[in-house]
Image (spheres, rainbow, N blue to C red):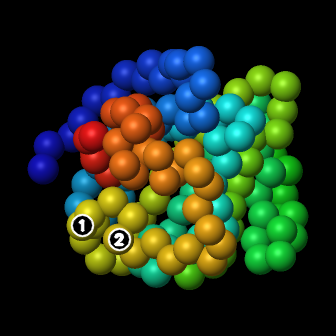
């Protein structure tokens, strides 16, 4: 594997789009992405069996929660949360501007299909179900390089 030089360009949210994802880099055990999240683009309570995640706010604000909607941390720019594997969490954009957040995830096994190690602890949000059916397009499906 060769080194990869990355030039970041913020993903653009289309009107009504809850979330846009820009994949920055990926290996068989780690990936780096930036998500831009509107209010309403939050995810559901879930965990990953094999993946540790690091979330770092670039702009906007995020609230991270665990089981029973217990607040872990409200993060502003240059603050973040480390989520160890098997730890249930969810987050939401909570500022006056869209959340721009760096996502780094590392796996103890090679990555396979997107989210194959994901365990949902609450029903998925409606927009996530639309994305899985391909209704929200490429930008919302960028995690792990998935294309719609």
Q: How crowded is mark 1: few (under 14 residues within 10 Å), some or many (20 or more)?
A: few
> In this view of the protein, which residue sits in the foreground, 133 or 107?
133
Mark pair 1, 2: CA separation: 7 Å
Q: Residue at x 40, y 38 (%)?
A: 135
Residue 69 x/y as whole percent: 83, 68
Is residue 85 visible in the rendered image? The answer is: no
Residue 57 x/y as whole percent: 68, 40
Is residue 86 visible in the rendered image? The answer is: yes
Mark number, residue 112: 1
Residue 44 drawn above or below residue 3: below
Q: Residue at x 39, y 64 (%)?
A: 115
Report the number of discs: 2
Residue 135 drawn above or below residue 48: above
Secondary structure at badge 2 equals loop
Mark number, residue 14: none
Residue 74 x/y as whole percent: 85, 50
> In this view of the protein, which residue sits in the foreground, 43 or 123?
123
Secondary structure at badge 1 equals loop
Q: Name the residue under label 2.
A: 116
- Horizontal side of residue 123 vs 119, given as left or right: right
- Horizontal side of residue 8 vs 73, given as left or right: left
Which quadrant of the figure has residue 45? bottom right
């Amino acid at each position: 594997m060769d080194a990869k030089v990355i030039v970041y360009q913020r993903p653009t949210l289309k009107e009504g789009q809850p979330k846009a994802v820009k994949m920055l880099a990926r290996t068989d055990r780690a990936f780096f992405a930036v998500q831009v999240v509107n209010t309403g683009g939050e995810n559901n309570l879930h965990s990953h069996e094999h993946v540790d995640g690091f979330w770092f706010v670039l702009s906007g604000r995020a609230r991270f929660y665990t089981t029973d909607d217990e607040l872990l941390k409200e993060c502003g720019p240059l603050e973040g949360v480390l989520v160890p594997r098997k730890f249930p969490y969810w987050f939401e954009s909570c500022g006056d501007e869209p959340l721009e957040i760096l996502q780094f995830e590392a796996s103890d096994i090679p990555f396979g299909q997107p989210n194959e190690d994901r365990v949902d602890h609450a029903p998925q949000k409606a927009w996530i179900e639309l994305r899985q059916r391909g209704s929200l397009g490429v930008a919302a499906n960028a995690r792990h390089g998935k294309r719609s």
